[in-house]
Amino acid sequence: MTTGFPYTLSRNAFGKLIYTPADGSPPEEVVPVRAFPIHAESEDISLVGPGGHEVAWISNLADLPDEARDLVREELNHREFMPEIQRIVGVSGYVTPTTWTVKTNRGEARLWLKSEQDIRRISMSKLLISDGHGVHFLIRDLERLDRTSRRILDRFL
Amino acid sequence: MTFPSHPLSSLPDTWRGQAAPPLADGETVCAWVELDLDTDLHYAQGILVLTETRLLAGSPAGWTGWPLREGLRLALSDHAGVVTLELVTSHERQALWRTTMAQHAGAVRLAEQFDRQREALAEGGTAARLAPACPRCHAPLPPGEKHCPACEADAPVADKEWALLRLRRFARPYRGRLLAGFILTILSTAATLVPPYLTMPLMDDVLIPFQNGKPIDYGLATLYLSGLLGAALVAWVLGWSRTYILAWVSERIGADLRTTAYEHLQQLSLEYFGGKRTGDLMARIGNETDRICVFLSLHLLDFATDVLMILMTAGILVSIDPWLALVTLLPLPFIAWLIHLVRDKLRHGFEKVDRNWAEITNVLADTIPGIRVVKAFAQEKREVARFREANNHNLAVNDKVNTVWSMFSPTVILLTEIGLLVVWIFGIWQIANHHISVGVLAAFLAYISRFYLRLDSMSRIVSVTQKAAAGAKRIFDILDRVSSVPEPANPVPLAHVEGRIQIRDAAFRYGTRAVLRGIDLDIQPGEMIGLVGHSGSGKSTLVNLICRFYDVSQGSIMVDGVDIRSLSIPEYRHNIGVVLQEPFLFFGTVAENIAYGKPDASREEIVAAARAAHAHEFILRLPHGYDSLVGERGQALSGGERQRISIARALLIDPRILILDEATSSVDTSTEQEIQKALDNLVQGRTTIAVAHRLSTLRRADRLVVLDRGRIVEQGRHEELIAKGGAYYRLHLAQTRQLDPPGSDSNWDGDDEEQA
């Protein structure tokens, strides 16, 4: 048992995360949610209960005991889906709607771009592309893409 | 229906082939969904297959099966574009699969079929199969259809690169005049080619003999010179009429294009406007159509003339002297190649310029309406910086295009000079060898100096065509968009609307977010329903669905037993009166604004509606009564006054169904009472759906429906719900204790003199 930490986290038979307060209050099923999924990956995470109310706030994952941290991280990996584009392999055409083949940190995927306006600039080097099916693809650093990808992307910006 | 004979024939090819699932005798595929993610959310191929007795999961590694039994449940959920399917028993999770939203419809179908089979299993019968569905998008096929209408609509429309050619649809009504213009173009071009031809005999028969000592033949000279003058005059008249006719036509094509684009825009659903920014749409309809118009009337016309001229000149040159003609025309392929080279680069550049221009307009459209906020937070400098950034971006993009563009014209001029030089050299050499006369060389030089001049202007067509094509593409982007709230092909006629509304298992998702789920609601004619719930609980969305501003993603909404999707949209909306939180007044008189939904209303009707809406008296206090101008640039009206005008507007069309969407939220309590009196008149005898944050405004409702996170959690009368002590009780408690400031008495700016 971790000493001094106000709650413990565990996983039940349904695979859900269970929050058990150290003060003896009844345990609750929780879901970790990143408050800033783009700007802060391992900071500012909220544990949200079944009614949508916040149960606990984690300002930094590093503050958690090891096992709890692993559980939260695992759960986030299974929940938050925002593939990061590493390379644009090819596009079906330069006129929207068009389908891109992209290499992401989640494997190779097809991205269906409905209109150029679905590419949003978050900052100078960060782009968020909403695919026609609702998946958000992130380009974390424009400068780190290879030349071919940048040239393709440039045609849409 | 007949089910395919082979048990696996309904599966997609990859899964039917090498990796067929091991089916027992008599076992067939009832439903399936392809999965494109693994449990760790990495892209991977998989499939879920439901048969009569088992649920099979396939991956490239092999198959796993779960026999169906009682207590087994397939739970479907989605979050952030990912669909999760969980196979659970009462005490644990057996398996979990994930896929992207692209497969959502298939997953829903599989889960539905699973439920049917589970229920049948419990009752000991066999489950009915779902209606056949499109194998690609899993949407149920309409009876008698083999192909999915949704998927066919998605199929790529004609090559969009050829957007300019698609403009011919707008040229069709003016065919006759276009043909006349074309013939005039040929004639006028031919007329301009006469003068250089006359230089040849003028040189050889008049000037050269004079140099050789013969006197000038004045008769001959006069003849040739009057020929020159005549040709110039004919060219002038023809050119003038040609330009006039073609400019007339292109102006009309541009106007038609603009109106058609706007007309189409008006037909599109709110969903489209939600995703677009005003500045961008305004730029498209305004600037782009104008650009296309200028292109058609000026550049395209010039270009056609140039091409004709080059062809004719080439013909004349060859007829005079084939060898010299060959040398003269030699630089032509080079220039054509150069044009082709620059073409692509410039087009992308111009598309970029356009997009950036829209970005600048967007900054304006964002900040000008929000100027109060900008000033209140003293962020003028920040907004200027934002504008400057967009502008600098625009500069950078333009600089890049100009680098290519600026090099282009001088290069063409250089080639022209070199071409002239070649003709001089070859011509002198030919004269020295007595192959041609001086007159021929003079004629050639006269021709090609014009000719090359035209090539230079022709090269300009590259950029303007690209600009116009980019503009046309952006216009056709609008025109190609199919409304997500389509007008039915054969609408069911709507005679007299009773106002009975039935909502069956309705769900709505906005993007990937499920806003409403499993809504079942019956509303009797004349009943007043109050929709309550926290903000974001889906109240306004439900109202938008009933108005058919959006279509349900699942389930149906019926009015008098007819699905609203099978009714003609305008006819249906004539039966709905809407009063919104922020009443919008158009620029025009008070009377015009009241009669907005029924432009032919008589003055008596307008006054009656205004009286009923308690607006009559304040309207009479306005300087010009009902003829006072309101709306942007018009008379300033308070929030309550504007709201009462919008109530009169709704009253005038005498709708059977009335929607009050937070009609009193943005005004203070005393104004609210005034509005409430007006509303009481409006509600009488109509099916009313009122959305309100402030529960006190719903005191007259026959029934309250409490929504929470997209579901109906409670319904009943105020007293019943209070007695129940559930969600409504908590809402009520929060408001009576003033714990819930938004919407309670905190709106003290309602009486502000505000422009509409």
Image (tube, helix red, strand yellow):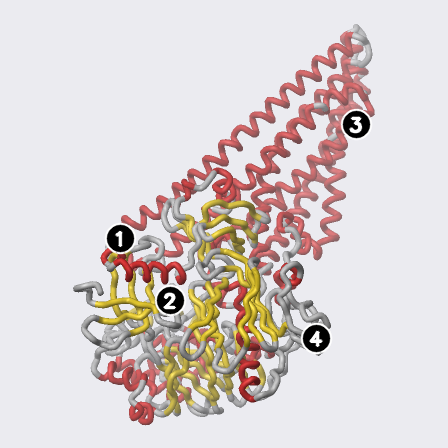
Q: Is residue B263 visible?
A: no
Separation of residues labelled 4 and 3 (CA atoms): 73 Å
Separation of residues labelled 4 and 1 (CA atoms): 66 Å
Judge by depth and name the residue closer to the eye, B126 or B100.
B126
Which badge, 1 or 2, is on the more N-terminal residue?
A: 1
Image coordinates of residue B631 in percent, x first then y, are 39, 68
Q: Chain of mark 4?
A: B
Which badge, 3 or 1, is on the more N-terminal residue?
A: 3
In the drawing, does residue B3 fall left or right of residue A9? Answer: right
Q: Are marks 1 and 2 on the same chain?
A: yes
Residue ID at (79%, 19%): B323
Instruction: Kindly indicate whether the residue at mark 2 contacts the one at mark 4 (C-beta within 8 angstroms).
Output: no
Residue ID at (53%, 45%): A89
How busy is the neighbourhood of tag 3: few (under 14 within 10 Å), some, or many (20 plus)?
some
The type of residue carrying mark 3 is Ile
Which badge, 4 or 2, is on the more N-terminal residue?
A: 4
